[in-house]
Structures are given as structure tokens and as C-alpha cells.
Amino acid sequence: MRVRQYIFLIGAMVLFAAPNLRSQEFLGVTIDNYTPANAMLTNPSAIVDQKPWLDIHVVGVGVHATNNFVYLPKTTLLNFAGYQIPSVNLSPDNGWGQVNTQVLGPSASLSLGKHALGLHTSVRASASLSKLPLEYAQLLIQGGGVADSTVLSVNNTRIKTLTWGEVGITYGRILYQFDKHLFTGALTLNRLMGLQSATLFIDEGSMLVQNDRGTLIDGNGKYAYATPAFRAGGGWSGSLGVTYKRMVDDVSEYVPHGRGVGCHTLPYKWKVSASLVDIGGIRMKRNALYNKFDENENPDEYLNAVASGPSVSTIPKDGDRYTAWLPMGFNTQFDYNFERGLFLNGFFMQRLSFPSSYGPDRSNLIAFTPRYEKKWLMVALPMSLENYKDPHLGLAFRLWILTVGTEHIFPYFVPSNIHTADLYVHLRLRLNKAPGCRVKPYNGLEEFKLKDLFNRTEKDPAACPDW
């Protein structure tokens, strides 16, 4: 198999996914109390007792790509003229990389007193690669670097990609309230539409490099593939979450956005939440196949067919339907309110996907994020540790209807060897009060005072619904 075909194969797997696998979780827009339509994707219960009465997400995109062996040397992400052929670091024990992209379409979350509803639409793409022989990666990217007739060991190599569309509905409600204790829960059900899937496992084998070609001369593993199509497959997934809030005031009779609290929500002193996300998978069945191979079969037929075009009719296969599982994970958060708009968030994500599954893997993540949060402004500084070993410092801000952020800000401004790129942008509309809670205009000039236009506060009495 020629090097250019391998480049096409691996490049397609990663770059096709590049249009959150959620390696990073786009923290700035996930932990913000005023963006629940985004937060519910990590924990569905975020929409219960949400700050805005109605949060309408118009459009947003997030991209995160990271690896430990390929990098842009001594440049910044904004210095496009400084881009050149990437360099390869051969020092790690194995090569790994991950890409996460999410295009979040029209979505919304609505507070209905003690209940809440949410709807979201998105296109997501995930790619993960682990234990790639780095000498071979150097050959693919730079050409040369490996002596002719070299035999490389290939063990536990995993390349996985998955792209899918998602339409989901979320329902949540207050489960328990007494004194200063507020306990909420919610669940999400998603309809999934598979768009693309490709997987290659090499459990153990030997690769011969000769004439700029890499050929697996012996080994065993498995592969799966579905020709990219609008409905290459279909499936279902779900997420569920719970949140406990330690409130500042007694909430025994509390109804969010109700008349009893002036059409607003009550503040919490701290909260802790937990969730399971992306529980489910996609049944690939349109021009799809899977196969286990050993030393008697040559996976080059699979690689060549995938690299050369959409036809898969000549590839050896054990069957023509398989399930690609989503990158399932367990998330827990802690958020402390220092008051005056100052918060500190702790975030933990643990992947739960199986290494042998056909679906991509999620990154593990630990993060601590101080933030300043008001109705029309939010600034956050997420300090994260991806896969428990790669530290990043990010920056996110929300101004009125726009949120912009990154989990790794240094590559944008500090010249360095760039292994990671991350950016997300979201546009939304919000109604902080229910229509019945809006202040009615004054009747007649006798009741009108010009200064009232500027002095009215959120705590002014209003005709609010009882829900």
C-alpha cells in the first residue's frame, strides 16, 4: 500500500471528523448558569431551575484536536504564514491523538416551574488514535526517516472514527425540596443518524517498510467500515443526570420563575451534580462491513479500498452490519458561589467506553475553573488536565448573546510547538423572564416618572404566573 494512500486514510479519518469524540468539554459554555441549552448536553438536569426562563441556542461550533507526536514547530495558531510540514516527536512510547467536533444547531431549554423541557440538534464527529508506531508516522507525514526493509512491531494499535447527526429531547423536574435542600433530575433521549464510521484494530503484528510502503506481513485484529452517506445507519442514545443544590434561602415552597420569588430563581451557595452521557450506539447497515483477520488474511485490501474510494465490495468481511458505540462517559461537577458573581467550578469526566468497541473513545478530563458570571457577562479561566497528564489553560467569555472560548489559549499568542488546537463559538437568544412576568407599562402621564425607566430592578413586583 502506497504512503499517499495511508495519508489519505488516516487524514480522512481525522480531518473528516474535524468539521468536544469530546476530548475537551467546552467548559466555558458548559458550566455557565446562563447557557443551559449547552450545559444539558453534559448534564441534562442543568435545565431544571435554570437562570433564564427560555434559552434559545441559534448556532454554535466547537473543535478540539490534540496528539502527542505531530506538531507545528515554533509558531502560533494565528500565524498562518508560519505553517509548514509538521514535525514528528519520536520520544513517546506510543502515538495517540484525538479530535472532537460539534456543530450545535437550533436548540432550546424552557423552565416550566418545577418542570423543564429541552430540545437540541447537532452534528458530532469523533476520531481517536492510539499506539501508532511513531517511525511509521514520521514516514507518512514527512517521507523517509525509516530505513528500507525495516520491520516495525505493531501492537494494540487503534484507529476509530464516527460522525453522526443527533436530535434529542430532555425532560427534567425538581425531585425533592425542603428547607435549603433542592434536588433535581433529568434525562435525555436522542435519535441518532450515522454519517460515517471507520475502525482498524491491530492487536499484534509486524509491518514491513519497503519502497515507501508499509505492509502488514503478519498479525491479527479487526476492522469495520461504513461508506459515508446521509443515513449510513441509525440508533438511539440517552443521558441522565442529577443535581443537588444547597440553597441560600428556604425553598420548601419554591417555584422557579414563579410569582413567589419575583419571577426569578433563587441563588445557591454550592451545588454538586453527576451524569452519565452518550449511552447508546448506531447500527451501521448501509454499505457497511466488519471483519476479524489473522495472519491468513491481509488487511491491506481493507486499507486500499477505504483509501481509494467508496466501493467496499472487494473487502473480506464476516458480516455487513455492526454497532458503533458513542463515547460514553461519567461526569461529576462541583460549583461554589462566592457571591458578587464569583464562582469556582470543579469538573471531572471519566470515559466509560470499551477499548475494543467500534466507536471512538472519550478523553478523561479534570478541570478547575474560576469565573465571573452575571446576566449579560461571563468570564472563565478553565485550568484543565486532559487524560490526567496534559495541562491546559483556557479562556472563555460571554457578552450578551455571544460566547467565545478555548480550552488552550497559549497556542494563539505564544510561539511554541503546537500539539493542541481548540476553539468554540456559540450564538443564542434568551428570555430571562416569562411573558407573564414582564412589567406592564404605566397608564397615563400621572403615573409615569422618567427616572423609573432607569431605576427598576429585577426585584420589582410584577404580575407573574403561578405555573
Image (spheres, grey):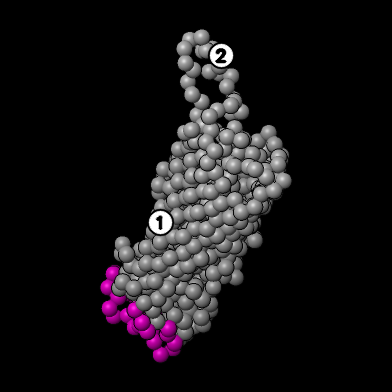
Q: Nearer the viewer, residue 31 or 40?
A: 40
Check residue 308 for magenta coloring. Answer: yes
Residue drawn at point x = 45 percent, y = 38 percent:
429
239 with respect to 4 (left or right): right
Residue drawn at point x = 43 percent, y = 56 percent:
168
**Residue 10: horizontal and vertical position, in percent?**
41, 67
Work out whether mark 1 precedes mark 2 in sequence or the reverse, and give the earlier one. Answer: 1
Relative to 391, say whether 135 is above or below. below
**Residue 342: horizontal and vertical position, in percent?**
67, 38
Q: Which residues are magenta?
A: 292-320
Residue 89 appears in the rendering:
no
Q: Nearer the viewer, residue 328 or 182?
A: 182
Q: Nearer the viewer, residue 222 or 79?
A: 222
Residue drawn at point x = 50 percent, y = 29 percent:
438
Q: Nearer the viewer, mark 1 or mark 2?
A: 2
Residue 55 appears in the rendering:
yes
**Residue 267: horizontal and vertical position, in percent?**
66, 39
Badge 2 element: loop
Per the rendering, the mark at residue 451 is: 2
Task: Look at the magenta stretch and give its main secondary structure.
Answer: loop
Look at label 1 and name its amino acid: Val
Q: Quadrant of residue 2?
A: bottom left
The residue singled out by tag 1 in the image is: 167
122 with respect to 466 (left or right): left
Per the rendering, the mark at residue 405 is: none
Q: Nearer the viewer, residue 118 or 303?
A: 118
Check residue 166 for magenta coloring. Answer: no
Look at label 2 and name its amino acid: Lys
Using a 10 Å C-alpha cutoff, classify the residue at mark 2 as few (fewer than 14 neighbours), some (14 to 19) or many (20 or more): few
Using a 10 Å C-alpha cutoff, classify the residue at mark 1 as few (fewer than 14 neighbours), some (14 to 19) or many (20 or more): some
Badge 1 element: strand
Residue drawn at point x = 72 percent, y = 46 percent:
179
